[in-house]
Amino acid sequence: MRIPIVAANWKMHKTVPEARAYLERLIGLAGRDPGVEVVVFPSFTALPAAAALLEGVPVGLGAQDAHPEPAGAYTGAVSVAQVADLGVRYVLCGHSERRKLFGEDDALVGRKVRAALEYGLAPILCVGEALEERRAGRAWEAVDRQLDRGLGPVEGDPDGLVIAYEPVWAIGTGVAAQPADAQEMADRIRRWLRERFGAVGDAIRVQYGGSVKPDNAREFLSLPDVDGALVGGASLDPDAFWAIVQSARR
Ligand code: PGA
């Protein structure tokens, strides 16, 4: 049985006081056990405050990115070692905005995944095809390549690994994937994981992400091979995010 994981990716939103206010509201709601793993991904600046507030609360914490080198001359970057030190459990690796806007390639994403695992953190590897790739019937080819390269450097069992399937054209556009397409992709990803990691692959959760909202969340979260959601825009409001979390109850 895979416990669904629903995650809030705040992206570049919220000052520290705003993050505190959000989390206070979320903590109030999270008192009622949803039977779902809930994770928030604030900006780096809000991570220490979030870690303090979430102590003893059943809401996990993640970093939106992390540099694979433990330390060094990388101005502006924050390392996996540094976020691990803050009580973070998850690290997003290869979000499409990092790939597109910051030029991250599959090789760098693979190094991040490996570094996260080395520090005992759980990577959420984001994969997904561009619109041209879907139109050309090459969606799986793109995802297969991202899985191959993103997980290539991993040795041994990838403890805690989660895959987020996020078609690039669905992110922040209000146009979510068709649930049947999300299911098909999640199923192919699962078969890929089984082939690569054996029985361990069965326990790896596959999320859907891309314009998930309170009113469409259940369509995705009830799919047999979708084990949660990675939510951007609709996660910025704690009540809307909580409504999505509730949809993941099984
Ligand atoms: P969205 O973002 O929910 O705003 O489409 C999803 C994501 O970027 O993870």
Image: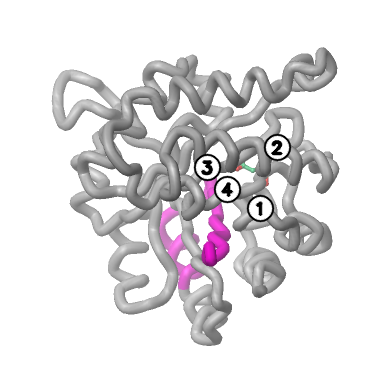
What amino acid type is highlighted by mark number 3?
Ile
Of the numbered discs 4 and 3, the one sitting upstream in the chain is 3
For residue 59, the mark is: none
Check disc 4 and report the residue beneath it.
206
Q: Which residues are magenta?
A: 1-23
Instruction: Decide which of tag 2 and tag 4 comes sooner along the chain.
Output: 2
Question: For this rendering, which residue is in front, 42 or 214?
Answer: 214
Query: Residue 226: which numbered mark, if any?
Result: 1
Q: Are marks 4 and 3 in contact (CB under 8 Å)?
A: yes
Viewer-closest of 19 and 34: 34
Above or below 99: residue 212: below
Quarter location, residue 213: bottom right
Quarter holding ligand 1: top right
Quadrant position of residue 68: top left
Residue at 21% in and 44% down = 119
Q: Is the residue 109 above or below the residue 52 in the image?
A: above
The spot of residue 40 in percent (x, y) is 47, 58
Q: Label 3's element? A: strand
Identify the residue shown where x is 67% and y is 43%. 187
The Cα atoms of the two marked residues, 4 and 3, are separated by 5 Å
Q: CA distance from mark 2 to mark 4?
A: 10 Å
* Count of all numbered marks drawn on residues in the image: 4
List the residue tagged with mark 3.
163
Q: Residue at x 48, y 50 (%)?
A: 204
Mark 1 touches mark 4? (CB < 8 Å): yes
